[in-house]
Image (cartoon, rainbow, N blue to C red):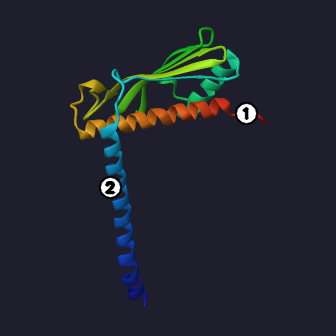
């Protein structure tokens, strides 16, 4: 009885794995097609500017809280954390696999600017090269597309965190 049960479940398990891999391949193919039609910024810098009805100190405190939730309590890459000028700089922030960027948050009264630049990638090992040094190919365009999607997701996360109400 146990053998019959295993024989019946084994093909169902195998076929379910194939459908998942097919979905992943189809998603990757769609991402490549989208990446081929996109124009990426040159230099590879992403800047997001937005206004919000909060004071400079509130934006700064919420930004610090957001960084703790995103990075954890590991401040080894924090370069500048200055509340008087309203500037936060994080270096070597790994947003995408084997890719590092510099995250800069500039804060003024009622508005903020998030900049992700100095994007570097590592093919093998610890040697990080600038993103513009990558040879132009379909894989390069796909990687740039995925990096830009990650950057957009980070900004959306930051924007959502700032607009969240602090009701306890």
Going from N to C along the chain, the mark reached first, 1 or 2, is 2
- Left or right, 143 with reference to 77: left
Image quadrant where one finds the C terminus: top right
Q: Residue at x 51, y 33 (%)?
A: 154
Give the image location of residue 20, x and y in percent: 38, 62
Q: Residue at x 61, y 24 (%)?
A: 63
Q: Residues within 10 Å of mark 2 (few under 14, many from 20)?
A: few
Q: Is any atom of residue 137 visible in this view?
A: yes
Quarter of the rendering containing residue 8: bottom left
Q: Which residue is mark 1?
A: 165
Position of 4 relative to 89 (above/below)? below
Q: Residue at x 33, y 22 (%)?
A: 42
- Left or right, 115 with reference to 163: left
**Real-space CA distance between mark 1 and mark 2, rounded to the nearest whole angstrom:** 40 Å
Give the image location of residue 60, x and y in percent: 63, 19
Q: Residue at x 22, y 32 (%)?
A: 136
Q: How many marks?
A: 2
Residue in the foreground of this view, choosing between 92 and 58: 58
Q: Residues within 10 Å of mark 1 (few under 14, many from 20)?
A: few
Q: Considering the numbered disc 2 on the image, is that residue within a helix, a strand or a loop?
A: helix
Image quadrant where one finds the N terminus: bottom left
Position of 86 relative to 8 (above/below)? above
- Left or right, 135 with reference to 11: left
Q: Considering the numbered disc 1 on the image, is that residue within a helix, a strand or a loop?
A: loop
Give the image location of residue 153, x and y in percent: 50, 36
Quarter of the rendering containing residue 101: top left
Residue sticking out furthest to the front: 37
Residue in the foreground of this view, choosing between 12 and 124: 12
Q: Which residue is mark 2?
A: 25
């Amino acid at each position: 009885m146990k053998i019959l049960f295993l024989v019946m479940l084994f093909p169902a398990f195998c076929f379910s794995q194939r459908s998942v891999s097919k979905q992943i391949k189809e998603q990757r193919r769609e991402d490549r097609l989208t990446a081929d039609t996109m124009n990426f910024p040159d230099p590879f810098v992403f800047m997001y500017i937005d206004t919000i009805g909060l004071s400079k100190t509130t934006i700064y405190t919420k930004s610090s809280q957001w960084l703790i939730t995103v990075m954890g309590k590991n401040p080894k890459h924090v370069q500048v954390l200055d509340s008087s000028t309203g500037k936060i700089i994080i270096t070597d922030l790994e947003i995408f696999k084997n890719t590092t960027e510099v995250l800069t948050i500039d804060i003024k009264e009622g508005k903020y600017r998030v900049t992700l630049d100095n994007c570097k990638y590592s093919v093998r090992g610890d040697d990080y090269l600038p993103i513009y040094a990558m040879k132009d190919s379909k894989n390069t365009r796909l990687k740039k597309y995925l990096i830009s999607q990650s950057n957009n997701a980070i900004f959306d996360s930051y924007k959502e965190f700032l607009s969240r109400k602090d009701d306890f």
